[in-house]
Image: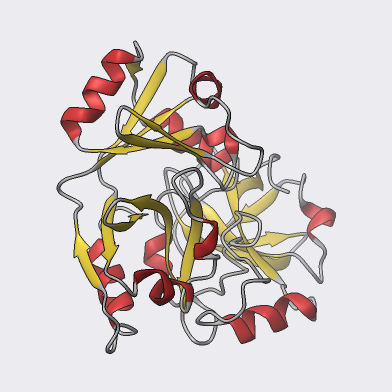
Amino acid sequence: MKKDQVVILEKRGVILVSGEDSKDFLQNIITNDINKVSNKNSVFSALLTPQGKYLNEFFIIQNVKGYLLDCSENSSGELIKDLSKYKLRSKVEIEDFSTEFVIGVINDSKFKELQGDLKSNENTITYRDTPIFLDPRNRKLGARIISNLEKLYLTIKKLSLKIIDNKEYYSLAHKLGVPEKGLINLKDQLFGLEANFETLQAIDFKKGCFVGQENTARMKLKNKLRRRLLPISSSEELNIGDEITFNNIKIGKILINQPYPFGLIKVLEPNLEDFKNEILLANNKKCKILENVK
């Protein structure tokens, strides 16, 4: 994506968490530290099961009424349901604003032009009453604009941006190992660390307790992360459930299929470095792990 371009992610979900207990409510359950969130900083975070398995992932942006959660497409209803389980007597309101907000993405170089005096540990600015924040997962994914549609188009016009097909953005995310599509279908099927939430800056192990913290911390401290969700490339169509092999040894399977496939791959016994750059087979179809993965 070039400096003068913008993509619009039309099917994102947006939730507002508000009320006098909203900060403590989120801090007690999400994987990241809500204290990092301010009008100059936004974070990527997740909600896990008590066993440490993935339920949902989202960005958190401060709002005058509370906190906006920018979540996976078509998942706002499920996220509200999952969050509401922990509401109990907390003075919190959880509302779906998905029809009122859209997400735009601009080049990180364009964001640098706008960021002013932001400190190195800050990533969010307010431009004409609209929050714009550098993607905390990977700055190469640019900066996200969260706004209603009318304000977004005014921002695009003011910044002289050209709207391009969002396929370019999704392709870049795939190459960088960020599953923008299909992850919500893996709810309760893989651990947070297997979904790369630590690598994607979604987990703060210093914050204290969160739902699923015990198993997540144990897996990290005892080096028990044996599988990771990794981007796969192939000239052939890959299907969910296809077994991935290397030298006739099963090393994983496809969990997200075309157009941006990901596989849950062993990273120990055998070691990822042994086959990271090699040709693999997914149900006898040639494929490989994308090179940008760390």
User: Considering depth in this image, is 41 or 284 the residue closer to the camera?
Assistant: 41
Q: Quadrant of residue 76?
A: bottom left
Q: Is 210 positioned to the left or the right of 81 in the image?
A: right
Residue 29: x %, y % from top left = 46, 77
Q: Is 152 positioned to the left or the right of 187 in the image?
A: left
User: Considering depth in this image, is 35 or 208 the residue closer to the camera?
Assistant: 35
* Residue most extreme to the top: 160
Asked if residue 206 is positioned above or below residue 68 in the image, the reply reads below
Residue 66: x %, y % from top left = 31, 59
Q: Residue at x 51, y 32 (%)?
A: 142
Q: Quadrant of residue 79?
A: bottom left
Q: How many marks?
A: 0
Q: Residue at x 83, y 54 (%)?
A: 273
Q: Is 124 positioned to the left or the right of 74 in the image?
A: right
Asked if residue 1 is positioned above or below residue 122 in the image, the reply reads above
User: Considering depth in this image, is 39 or 61 the residue closer to the camera?
Assistant: 39
User: Considering depth in this image, is 263 or 165 the residue closer to the camera?
Assistant: 165
* Colour option used: secondary structure
Residue 37: x %, y % from top left = 49, 55
Q: Residue at x 19, y 54 (%)?
A: 97
Residue 288: x %, y % from top left = 66, 46
Asked if residue 53 is positioned above or below residue 198 in the image, the reply reads below
Q: Is 165 positioned to the left or the right of 95 in the image?
A: right
